[in-house]
């Protein structure tokens, strides 16, 4: 969600809460036995829970089904998911640009480090699709660098778009291409 959309949604929630609050006060004028203000109080209480539920859906949680069967690679993937979630939080709360840039730099550095580690493992295992897999890694780095430049230098892409791209790329890659080298893992380990 972009900063503007976040701002609008916060404004709508604030107006909604204020309206409900006024209606509760007016509702009590009908008498304490009247159900309306109590129902409205119930609605005000559940709004933060619903809001949290919606927000938490934007974060990715590690699932055992993502495991490639090697702790070091699974730990890297968990760390990358955590960093993407950090970026999601920064984007959601409109954190200042310096903080977002810092998270992006860390994320790119760790992704490169992880790819090198994964490529070394694939080489040691004699994985026959090594070249094609390495190409996917290189394409991802150039694509994400392009996205970040569009966000950082040209302002033509929002941080939320960068986050969405990273999320879907990583999950698809873990569940697709990374799973394909699993049968070879025991060869060179
Ligand atoms: Fe990979």
Image (cartoon, rainbow, N blue to C red):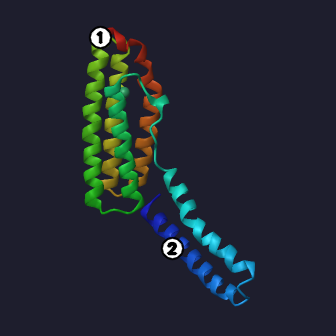
Identity of the residue furthest to the bottom in this view: 29
- Residue 139 visible: no
Residue 133 found in image quarter: top left
Residue 15 found in image quarter: bottom right
Q: CA distance from mark 1 to mark 2?
A: 57 Å
Residue matched to label 1: 188
Work out whether mark 1 precedes mark 2 in sequence or the reverse, and give the earlier one.
2
Where's residue 77, x and y in %? Answer: 36, 34
Q: Which mark is residue 11?
A: 2
In this view of the protein, which residue sits in the foreground, 130 or 53? 53
Examine the rendered structure and indicate whether residue 37 appears above or below residue 154: below
Label 2 crowd (10 A; few <14 / some 14-19 / many >=20): few
The quarter of the picture showing ligand 1: top left
Examine the rendered structure and indicate whether residue 17 appears above or below residue 66: below
Dot 1 lies on which element?
Answer: helix
In this view of the protein, which residue sits in the foreground, 93 or 1? 93
Identity of the residue furthest to the front in this view: 33
Q: Say which residue appears at 41% left-offset and 18% top-offset.
A: 182
Q: Is mark 1 within 8 Å of ligand 1?
A: no
Dot 2 lies on which element?
Answer: helix
**Quadrant in which the C terminus is drawn:** top left
189 sits to left or right of 92? left
Where's residue 25, x and y in %? Answer: 63, 86
Q: Say which residue appears at 51% left-offset and 73% top-offset.
A: 11
188 sits to left or right of 9? left
Where's residue 108, x and y in %? Answer: 28, 41
Examine the rendered structure and indicate whether residue 49 appears above or below residue 148: below
Q: Say which residue appears at 31% left-offset and 27% top-offset.
A: 72
């Amino acid at each position: 969600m972009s900063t503007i959309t976040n701002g609008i949604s916060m404004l709508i929630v604030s107006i909604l809460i204020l309206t409900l609050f006024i209606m509760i006060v007016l509702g009590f004028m009908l008498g304490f036995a009247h159900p309306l203000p109590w129902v409205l109080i119930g609605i005000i209480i559940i709004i933060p829970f619903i809001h949290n539920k919606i927000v938490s859906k934007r974060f990715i949680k590690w699932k055992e089904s993502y495991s490639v069967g090697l702790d070091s690679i699974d730990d890297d993937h968990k760390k990358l998911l955590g960093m993407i979630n950090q970026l999601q939080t920064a984007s959601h709360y409109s954190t200042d640009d310096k903080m977002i840039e810092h998270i992006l730099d860390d994320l790119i550095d760790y992704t490169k480090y992880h790819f090198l580690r994964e490529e070394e493992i694939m080489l040691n295992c004699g994985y026959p699709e090594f070249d094609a897999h390495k190409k996917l890694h290189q394409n991802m780095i150039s694509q994400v660098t392009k996205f970040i430049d569009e966000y950082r230098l040209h302002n033509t892409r929002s941080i939320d778009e960068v986050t969405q791209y990273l999320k879907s790329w990583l999950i698809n890659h873990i569940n697709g291409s990374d799973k394909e080298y699993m049968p070879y893992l025991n060869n060179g380990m």
